[in-house]
């Protein structure tokens, strides 16, 4: 699911 990838990017962005 592409939403999973979006969630991963969102998490990385929040951590950055």
Image (cartoon, rainbow, N blue to C red):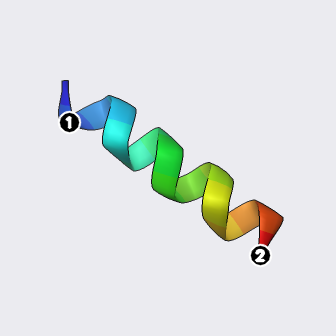
Q: Quadrant of residue 10?
A: bottom right
Identify the element where label 2 is drawn.
Answer: loop
Residue depicted at x 65% and y 68%:
13
In this image, 16 relative to 11: left or right?
right
* Residue at 75% in and 63% down: 14
Residue at the limit of the structure toward the bottom, as seen here = 16
Q: CA distance from mark 2 to mark 1?
A: 21 Å
Pointer 2: what residue?
16
Q: Residues within 10 Å of mark 1 (few under 14, many from 20)?
A: few
Tell whether 15 sits left or right of 1: right
**Disc nearer the start of the sequence (2/1):** 1
- Spot occupied by residue 5 in the image (x, y as percentages of width and height): 34, 42
Q: Residue at x 48, y 57 (%)?
A: 9
- Residue 4 higher or lower than 16, as above or below: above
Q: Secondary structure at mark 1?
A: helix
**On screen, 4 above or below 7?**
above
- Mark 1 sits on what residue? 2
Of the 4 image quadrants, the one containing the N terminus is top left
């Amino acid at each position: 699911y592409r939403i999973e990838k979006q969630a991963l990017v969102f998490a990385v962005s929040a951590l950055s």
